[in-house]
Image (cartoon, rainbow, N blue to C red):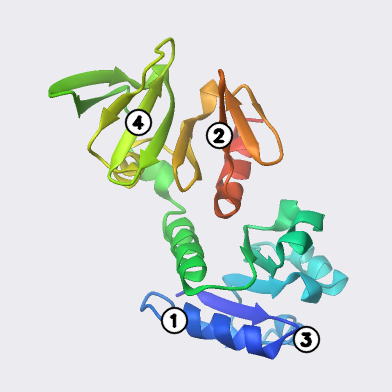
Amino acid sequence: MIHFYIVHHELSEALILQTYLSTTDFTNNVLIVDESALFNSTIDYPSVIICSISSLTNNILKWLKKQHSRPLIVCSGTSAEIENFVNSQQVFAYLQTPISLERVLSLKKNICDYVFGINKIETVEKKDFLFIKSDYKLIKITLSEVLFFSGLKDYTQIFLKGKKTPLTTLKNLKEFESKLHPVEFVRVHRSYIVAMNQVDFISKNEITIDTYTIPIGNTFRKMLDEAIERNS
């Protein structure tokens, strides 16, 4: 069961969020609460707190630091508020306003993938190579030579070390994500999975691998931060 708690300074936007989060059947509890309710031990412990940046007080931040098992934090706000927000290290994802159903459902899917896939690292088998179909051939790719995967709707391009032209295969990025070991390959954007051992450096919103620059999606930042932590 995932408990979504919404803390928002504007009730109208909180109600929209509650409606959008309740549109699919894999959420069991979506509540609008005030700050004091978070500190009330009689309510169910939140899995996710969606909080407007204006409502994220020092009291909430102090409470989060004291929790042994911290809920995921999602901050909503305008693009300017998100850009200026300084507590990004505690935030799982950002939800830019005005809020749309598409954005909320995409965020919700990422949250559920994260929560229900928490043990994925122990269960996914490590592979050294994969066979893919490309240009009417079955090609063996060695995973240690992969720089990153780039999704293009139903296609995926695979960029390899020392190769100027990527391989293109009729398989979507999600299928590759399910086969790759999450310690070695991390999804950093809805369109990109990167090989962590090939990363040259990471800036605020971008990853550089060889001569390529790859954007970091807000909803995938938490997974990237955890991958960095495992390798630090």
Q: Earlier in the sequence, mark 1 or mark 2?
A: 1
Cα separation, mark 1 vs mark 3, equals: 22 Å
Residue for badge 2: 214
Cα separation, mark 1 vs mark 2, equals: 35 Å
Q: Residues within 10 Å of mark 3 (few under 14, many from 20)?
A: few
Residue found farthest to the right? 58
Q: Residue at x 47, y 59 (%)?
A: 110
27 to the left or right of 202: left
- Disc 3 vs disc 2: which is toward the camera? 2
SS for callout 1: loop
Q: Is residue 198 above or below residue 35?
A: above
Q: Earlier in the sequence, mark 1 or mark 3?
A: 1
Contact, mark 3 vs mark 2 (Cβ under 8 Å): no
Q: Earlier in the sequence, mark 4 or mark 3?
A: 3
Give residue 181's position: percent from left, percent from top: 39, 35
Cα separation, mark 3 vs mark 2, equals: 41 Å
The numbered mark at residue 36 is: 3
The numbered mark at residue 124 is: none
114 to the left or right of 165: right
Q: Hey, what amino acid is under mark 2?
A: Ile
Q: Is residue 98 above or below residue 156?
A: below
The numbered mark at residue 157 is: 4
Give residue 126's position: percent from left, percent from top: 35, 31
